[in-house]
Image: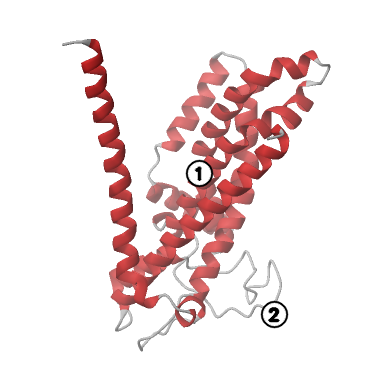
Protein backbone atom coordinates (compact mmCIF):
# COMPACT_ATOMS: atom_id res chain seq x y z
CA UNK A 1 0.00 0.00 0.00
CA UNK A 2 1.36 3.39 -0.94
CA UNK A 3 2.36 5.88 1.74
CA UNK A 4 -0.12 8.49 0.47
CA UNK A 5 -2.98 6.00 0.69
CA UNK A 6 -2.04 5.08 4.27
CA UNK A 7 -1.83 8.77 5.13
CA UNK A 8 -5.32 9.44 3.71
CA UNK A 9 -6.79 6.49 5.63
CA UNK A 10 -5.18 7.59 8.90
CA UNK A 11 -6.33 11.18 8.36
CA UNK A 12 -9.88 10.03 7.63
CA UNK A 13 -9.94 7.92 10.79
CA UNK A 14 -8.74 10.85 12.92
CA UNK A 15 -11.31 13.19 11.40
CA UNK A 16 -14.02 10.60 12.03
CA UNK A 17 -13.01 10.23 15.67
CA UNK A 18 -12.98 14.02 16.12
CA UNK A 19 -16.40 14.38 14.49
CA UNK A 20 -17.78 11.59 16.68
CA UNK A 21 -16.58 13.34 19.84
CA UNK A 22 -18.12 16.65 18.74
CA UNK A 23 -21.43 15.00 17.82
CA UNK A 24 -21.48 13.08 21.09
CA UNK A 25 -20.99 16.33 23.04
CA UNK A 26 -23.67 18.13 21.03
CA UNK A 27 -26.11 15.25 21.51
CA UNK A 28 -25.41 15.19 25.25
CA UNK A 29 -25.92 18.95 25.65
CA UNK A 30 -29.00 18.98 23.39
CA UNK A 31 -30.67 16.17 25.32
CA UNK A 32 -30.13 17.84 28.69
CA UNK A 33 -31.35 21.21 27.42
CA UNK A 34 -34.38 19.59 25.79
CA UNK A 35 -35.37 17.81 29.02
CA UNK A 36 -34.99 20.92 31.17
CA UNK A 37 -35.95 23.74 28.81
CA UNK A 38 -39.53 24.05 30.14
CA UNK A 39 -38.20 24.95 33.59
CA UNK A 40 -35.94 27.78 32.47
CA UNK A 41 -37.73 30.90 33.68
CA UNK A 42 -37.04 33.67 36.19
CA UNK A 43 -39.18 32.10 38.92
CA UNK A 44 -37.22 28.86 38.63
CA UNK A 45 -33.80 30.53 38.47
CA UNK A 46 -34.27 32.95 41.34
CA UNK A 47 -37.07 31.39 43.38
CA UNK A 48 -36.73 29.45 46.62
CA UNK A 49 -37.17 25.67 46.73
CA UNK A 50 -40.41 24.33 48.22
CA UNK A 51 -40.40 21.38 50.57
CA UNK A 52 -43.89 19.91 50.32
CA UNK A 53 -45.30 21.40 47.12
CA UNK A 54 -44.41 21.65 43.46
CA UNK A 55 -43.07 24.68 41.63
CA UNK A 56 -39.96 25.47 43.65
CA UNK A 57 -36.90 27.30 42.35
CA UNK A 58 -33.14 26.95 42.64
CA UNK A 59 -32.14 30.51 43.60
CA UNK A 60 -30.10 29.66 46.74
CA UNK A 61 -28.38 26.69 45.08
CA UNK A 62 -27.49 28.77 42.03
CA UNK A 63 -25.97 31.50 44.20
CA UNK A 64 -24.10 28.90 46.28
CA UNK A 65 -22.58 27.36 43.14
CA UNK A 66 -21.22 30.69 41.91
CA UNK A 67 -19.99 31.66 45.37
CA UNK A 68 -18.33 28.27 45.79
CA UNK A 69 -16.66 28.78 42.40
CA UNK A 70 -15.21 32.16 43.42
CA UNK A 71 -13.94 31.04 46.83
CA UNK A 72 -12.43 27.80 45.52
CA UNK A 73 -10.67 29.51 42.59
CA UNK A 74 -9.23 32.12 44.98
CA UNK A 75 -7.44 29.20 46.63
CA UNK A 76 -6.74 27.02 43.60
CA UNK A 77 -5.29 29.60 41.18
CA UNK A 78 -2.57 31.13 43.41
CA UNK A 79 -1.37 27.79 44.75
CA UNK A 80 -1.66 25.93 41.44
CA UNK A 81 -0.02 28.71 39.46
CA UNK A 82 2.69 29.18 42.07
CA UNK A 83 3.45 25.46 42.06
CA UNK A 84 3.57 25.49 38.26
CA UNK A 85 6.04 28.40 38.26
CA UNK A 86 8.25 26.65 40.79
CA UNK A 87 8.29 23.33 38.94
CA UNK A 88 8.94 24.89 35.53
CA UNK A 89 11.40 27.68 36.44
CA UNK A 90 13.04 27.00 39.80
CA UNK A 91 12.96 23.27 40.62
CA UNK A 92 16.06 21.25 39.82
CA UNK A 93 16.02 17.65 38.69
CA UNK A 94 16.57 15.31 41.59
CA UNK A 95 14.91 13.31 44.34
CA UNK A 96 12.97 16.27 45.71
CA UNK A 97 11.42 17.07 42.33
CA UNK A 98 10.58 13.41 41.74
CA UNK A 99 8.92 13.25 45.15
CA UNK A 100 6.85 16.38 44.41
CA UNK A 101 5.72 14.96 41.08
CA UNK A 102 4.78 11.68 42.78
CA UNK A 103 2.66 13.60 45.29
CA UNK A 104 0.93 15.54 42.52
CA UNK A 105 0.19 12.39 40.53
CA UNK A 106 -1.13 10.66 43.65
CA UNK A 107 -3.41 13.59 44.47
CA UNK A 108 -4.67 13.66 40.88
CA UNK A 109 -5.73 10.01 41.10
CA UNK A 110 -7.67 10.35 44.36
CA UNK A 111 -11.44 9.70 44.04
CA UNK A 112 -13.55 12.69 44.96
CA UNK A 113 -15.34 10.71 47.67
CA UNK A 114 -11.99 10.16 49.41
CA UNK A 115 -11.23 13.87 49.26
CA UNK A 116 -14.69 14.49 50.68
CA UNK A 117 -13.96 12.20 53.64
CA UNK A 118 -10.62 13.97 54.12
CA UNK A 119 -12.45 17.31 54.13
CA UNK A 120 -14.95 15.92 56.63
CA UNK A 121 -12.18 14.89 59.01
CA UNK A 122 -10.00 18.00 58.62
CA UNK A 123 -12.09 20.98 57.51
CA UNK A 124 -15.38 19.97 59.18
CA UNK A 125 -14.41 18.08 62.35
CA UNK A 126 -10.86 19.08 63.33
CA UNK A 127 -11.39 22.79 62.69
CA UNK A 128 -14.82 22.78 64.30
CA UNK A 129 -16.32 24.70 61.38
CA UNK A 130 -18.99 22.12 60.65
CA UNK A 131 -20.67 21.92 57.25
CA UNK A 132 -19.66 25.21 55.68
CA UNK A 133 -19.03 26.79 52.31
CA UNK A 134 -15.36 27.25 53.22
CA UNK A 135 -14.95 23.55 54.02
CA UNK A 136 -16.40 22.65 50.62
CA UNK A 137 -14.28 25.21 48.77
CA UNK A 138 -11.06 23.95 50.38
CA UNK A 139 -11.95 20.34 49.58
CA UNK A 140 -12.60 21.21 45.93
CA UNK A 141 -9.32 23.13 45.88
CA UNK A 142 -7.54 19.94 46.99
CA UNK A 143 -9.15 18.13 44.04
CA UNK A 144 -8.20 20.83 41.52
CA UNK A 145 -4.64 21.64 42.62
CA UNK A 146 -2.94 18.74 40.78
CA UNK A 147 -4.54 19.52 37.41
CA UNK A 148 -4.03 23.27 37.82
CA UNK A 149 -0.38 22.70 38.72
CA UNK A 150 0.33 20.45 35.75
CA UNK A 151 -1.45 22.71 33.26
CA UNK A 152 0.39 25.77 34.58
CA UNK A 153 3.75 24.00 34.53
CA UNK A 154 3.34 22.81 30.94
CA UNK A 155 2.04 26.20 29.78
CA UNK A 156 4.90 28.12 31.40
CA UNK A 157 7.51 25.67 30.17
CA UNK A 158 6.22 25.92 26.58
CA UNK A 159 5.96 29.72 26.71
CA UNK A 160 9.34 30.29 28.32
CA UNK A 161 11.10 28.32 25.61
CA UNK A 162 10.15 31.04 23.11
CA UNK A 163 10.70 34.27 24.99
CA UNK A 164 12.68 33.70 28.19
CA UNK A 165 16.18 33.89 26.70
CA UNK A 166 15.31 37.05 24.75
CA UNK A 167 14.02 38.78 27.90
CA UNK A 168 16.99 37.77 30.00
CA UNK A 169 19.32 38.87 27.22
CA UNK A 170 17.82 42.36 27.39
CA UNK A 171 18.72 42.63 31.07
CA UNK A 172 15.46 41.65 32.78
CA UNK A 173 15.62 39.67 36.00
CA UNK A 174 14.20 36.18 36.22
CA UNK A 175 11.11 37.30 38.14
CA UNK A 176 10.53 40.21 35.76
CA UNK A 177 10.74 37.78 32.87
CA UNK A 178 8.22 35.42 34.48
CA UNK A 179 5.83 38.22 35.46
CA UNK A 180 5.99 40.42 32.37
CA UNK A 181 6.77 37.97 29.57
CA UNK A 182 6.26 34.30 30.37
CA UNK A 183 2.93 34.43 32.23
CA UNK A 184 1.15 36.67 29.67
CA UNK A 185 2.35 34.38 26.89
CA UNK A 186 1.04 31.34 28.77
CA UNK A 187 -2.34 32.91 29.63
CA UNK A 188 -4.44 30.91 27.09
CA UNK A 189 -3.15 27.57 28.41
CA UNK A 190 -3.46 28.67 32.05
CA UNK A 191 -7.07 29.69 31.43
CA UNK A 192 -7.66 26.16 30.16
CA UNK A 193 -6.62 24.92 33.59
CA UNK A 194 -8.94 27.43 35.26
CA UNK A 195 -11.85 26.29 33.06
CA UNK A 196 -11.18 22.64 33.93
CA UNK A 197 -11.15 23.57 37.61
CA UNK A 198 -14.39 25.54 37.22
CA UNK A 199 -16.08 22.58 35.55
CA UNK A 200 -15.03 20.39 38.47
CA UNK A 201 -16.41 22.91 40.95
CA UNK A 202 -19.75 23.26 39.15
CA UNK A 203 -20.23 19.52 38.75
CA UNK A 204 -18.76 18.09 41.96
CA UNK A 205 -21.21 16.55 44.40
CA UNK A 206 -19.49 13.70 46.26
CA UNK A 207 -16.89 15.85 48.03
CA UNK A 208 -19.41 18.58 48.88
CA UNK A 209 -21.89 16.18 50.47
CA UNK A 210 -19.46 15.68 53.35
CA UNK A 211 -18.17 19.23 53.62
CA UNK A 212 -20.61 21.92 52.43
CA UNK A 213 -23.75 20.06 53.47
CA UNK A 214 -27.14 19.51 51.86
CA UNK A 215 -29.08 22.48 53.16
CA UNK A 216 -29.61 25.93 51.64
CA UNK A 217 -30.82 28.47 54.21
CA UNK A 218 -32.89 31.49 53.22
CA UNK A 219 -30.55 34.15 51.80
CA UNK A 220 -31.02 37.82 52.67
CA UNK A 221 -28.63 39.70 50.41
CA UNK A 222 -28.80 42.89 52.44
CA UNK A 223 -26.89 41.14 55.23
CA UNK A 224 -23.22 41.36 54.21
CA UNK A 225 -20.74 39.43 56.35
CA UNK A 226 -18.05 36.82 55.77
CA UNK A 227 -18.48 35.17 59.17
CA UNK A 228 -22.10 35.68 60.27
CA UNK A 229 -24.07 32.54 59.44
CA UNK A 230 -27.17 34.56 58.56
CA UNK A 231 -25.38 36.29 55.68
CA UNK A 232 -25.42 34.77 52.16
CA UNK A 233 -21.78 35.86 51.79
CA UNK A 234 -20.68 34.03 54.93
CA UNK A 235 -17.98 31.40 54.56
CA UNK A 236 -19.22 29.59 57.63
CA UNK A 237 -22.73 28.55 56.64
CA UNK A 238 -24.01 25.41 54.92
CA UNK A 239 -24.08 25.78 51.15
CA UNK A 240 -25.93 23.25 49.02
CA UNK A 241 -24.73 23.67 45.45
CA UNK A 242 -26.67 22.93 42.28
CA UNK A 243 -24.92 19.59 41.70
CA UNK A 244 -25.70 18.44 45.25
CA UNK A 245 -29.29 19.63 44.80
CA UNK A 246 -29.64 17.50 41.66
CA UNK A 247 -28.26 14.48 43.50
CA UNK A 248 -30.67 15.02 46.40
CA UNK A 249 -33.67 15.39 44.11
CA UNK A 250 -32.85 12.21 42.19
CA UNK A 251 -32.05 10.16 45.28
CA UNK A 252 -34.68 11.38 47.75
CA UNK A 253 -37.44 12.86 45.56
CA UNK A 254 -38.47 15.24 48.34
CA UNK A 255 -40.97 17.23 46.20
CA UNK A 256 -43.72 16.06 43.80
CA UNK A 257 -41.99 17.50 40.72
CA UNK A 258 -38.48 16.38 41.71
CA UNK A 259 -37.69 14.98 38.25
CA UNK A 260 -38.72 18.22 36.53
CA UNK A 261 -36.63 20.35 38.89
CA UNK A 262 -33.65 18.02 38.47
CA UNK A 263 -33.90 18.26 34.68
CA UNK A 264 -34.12 22.04 34.84
CA UNK A 265 -31.20 22.21 37.26
CA UNK A 266 -29.11 20.04 34.93
CA UNK A 267 -29.87 22.36 32.03
CA UNK A 268 -28.89 25.40 34.10
CA UNK A 269 -25.67 23.66 35.13
CA UNK A 270 -24.75 22.95 31.52
CA UNK A 271 -25.45 26.55 30.52
CA UNK A 272 -23.36 27.83 33.44
CA UNK A 273 -20.37 25.77 32.33
CA UNK A 274 -20.74 26.86 28.69
CA UNK A 275 -21.07 30.54 29.59
CA UNK A 276 -18.11 30.41 31.96
CA UNK A 277 -15.98 28.72 29.29
CA UNK A 278 -16.92 31.35 26.73
CA UNK A 279 -16.22 34.27 29.08
CA UNK A 280 -12.93 32.72 30.19
CA UNK A 281 -11.77 32.31 26.59
CA UNK A 282 -12.72 35.87 25.68
CA UNK A 283 -10.85 37.29 28.67
CA UNK A 284 -7.79 35.14 27.97
CA UNK A 285 -7.69 36.19 24.31
CA UNK A 286 -8.05 39.85 25.26
CA UNK A 287 -5.15 39.62 27.76
CA UNK A 288 -2.98 37.69 25.33
CA UNK A 289 -3.60 40.19 22.51
CA UNK A 290 -2.86 43.15 24.77
CA UNK A 291 0.55 41.72 25.68
CA UNK A 292 1.43 40.30 22.26
CA UNK A 293 0.43 43.43 20.36
CA UNK A 294 -1.94 41.60 18.03
**Does residue 168 sit above or below 86 in this rendering?**
above
Quadrant holding the N terminus = top left
Q: In which quarter of the image is the C terminus?
A: top right
Circle 1 residues within 10 Å: few <14, some 14–19, many ≥20: many
Q: Which residue is drawn at 20% across and 10% down?
A: 2
**Tag 1 secondary structure:** helix
Locate residue 165, reporting x and y percent.
71, 15
In the rendered view, how is the structure colored? secondary structure
Check residue 222 in the rendering and tell me which mark sits there, or answer none.
Answer: 2
For disc 1, the marked residue is: 144
Residue 240 is left or right of residue 35, and the answer is: right
Extreme bottom residue here? 53
Q: Do callouts 1 and 2 mark residues in contact (Cβ within 8 Å)?
A: no
Q: Determine the image quadrant of residue 224.
A: bottom right
Which SS class for mark 2? loop
Q: From the viewer's perspective, tell me whether residue 118 is left or right of residue 237.
A: left
Disc 2 packing (10 Å; few <14; some 14–19; many ≥20) = few
In 3D space, how far apart are the residues under numbered discs 1 and 2 (Cα atoms)?
A: 32 Å
Q: Which of 4 and 130 is in front in this view?
A: 4
* Residue 209 image label: none
Q: In the visual, does 15 lie left or right of 178?
A: left
Whether residue 139 is visible to the viewer of this picture, yes or no, is: no
Residue at 57% over, 33% down: 152
Locate residue 261, reporting x and y percent: 35, 75
Q: Which of 93 and 59 is in front in this view?
A: 59
Amino acid sequence: MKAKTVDKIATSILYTISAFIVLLLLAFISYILYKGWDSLNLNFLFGRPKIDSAGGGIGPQLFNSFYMLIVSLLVTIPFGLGAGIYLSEYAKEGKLLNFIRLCIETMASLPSIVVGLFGLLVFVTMTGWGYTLLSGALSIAVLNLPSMTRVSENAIRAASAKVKEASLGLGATKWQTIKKVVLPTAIPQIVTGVILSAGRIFGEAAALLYTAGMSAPVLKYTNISLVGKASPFSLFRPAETLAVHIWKLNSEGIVPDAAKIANGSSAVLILMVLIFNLIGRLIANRIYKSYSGK
